[in-house]
Amino acid sequence: MKVKLKVWRQKDANSAGGFKEYETPELNANMSFLEMLDVVNDELTIKGEEPIAFDHDCREGICGTCSLVINGKPHGPHRGVATCQTYMRNFSDGDVITVEPFRARAFPVIKDLIVDRSAFDRIMQAGGFISVRTGSACDANALPVPKEAADLAMDAAACIGCGACVAACKNGSAMLFVSAKVSQFGLLPQGQPERDKRVLAMVKQMDAEGFGNCTNYYECSAVCPKLISHEFIARMNRDFLKATLRSAFTQAPTDSSAAG
């Protein structure tokens, strides 16, 4: 099979970009989408042209770096898979496929299909660590966790931070990502000491990075490769409201009391 690509090409963050068309050589229908781009890049290199820059790492749907918008949808046509898990057999011979980087103010384009998602790292850093000692294994059942809470925490922890939720949202909101990261700790006993501080700090950092607000259209959960539920957003909103109220009525220590 052969397809025609319309790929976004942009030299660097300060240059204007645009679409450029490429005809692929003969492809194996069982190639992944990234393997197809590898083949196209080999052809471009042989011709002495600049290969298409795109992010990738594990190619197993784990790392989240293979984030592309394919025919207008983050990660491509199917649900619950990353770009690296999209295969050419999902397309037909002669198809025209449009490939773009994620579009969001908080994800500036670095080059071609690569965007800067370090804003997610800064949000995670704002959340900090847990203070519970984790240096060695504790006795069985020493810290009991309800099955429902454990399952929800694992569901939230499945988020790979790819940014598809941001790319799909008309507001460029990162609420699904942040709510997953808040919930994976907030649902467990180990995450309780910093629960209020964590949600307040992460939401504050999210706003500072320029992400938009959530308007509950749920495009985020629809394109998430790990099927993270939008119900985590409601959970984070409740945690944020409670933390805001508690912090408003908590008396900050004075210098004298702190010294004592």
Image (tube, rainbow, N blue to C red):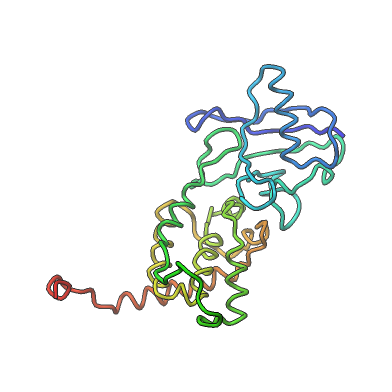
Q: Residue furthest left?
A: 256
> In front: 120, or 189?
189
Residue 158 drawn above or below residue 91 = below
Q: Where is residue 106 in the image (x, y as percent from the top left)?
A: 48, 47
Q: Residue furthest top?
A: 48
Q: Position of residue 139 (x, y in %)?
A: 52, 79
Identify the image quadrant of the N terminus. Answer: top right
At horizontal 50% and vertical 76% (from top left) the residue drawn is 138
Q: Where is residue 208 in the image (x, y as percent from the top left)?
A: 39, 54
Please state if 183 lies on the left or on the right of 27 as rendered: left
Q: Quadrant of residue 244?
A: bottom left
At horizontal 49% and vertical 60% (from top left) the residue drawn is 213
Please state if 31 lies on the left or on the right of 125 as rendered: right
> In front: 66, or 224?
66
> In front: 209, or 183?
183
Identify the image quadrant of the C terminus. Answer: bottom left
Q: Position of residue 41 (x, y in %)?
A: 70, 28
At horizontal 78% and vertical 32% (from top left) the residue drawn is 4
Q: In which quarter of the image is residue 79?
A: bottom right
Residue 122 drawn above or below residue 131 = above
Please state if 158 lies on the left or on the right of 38 as rendered: left
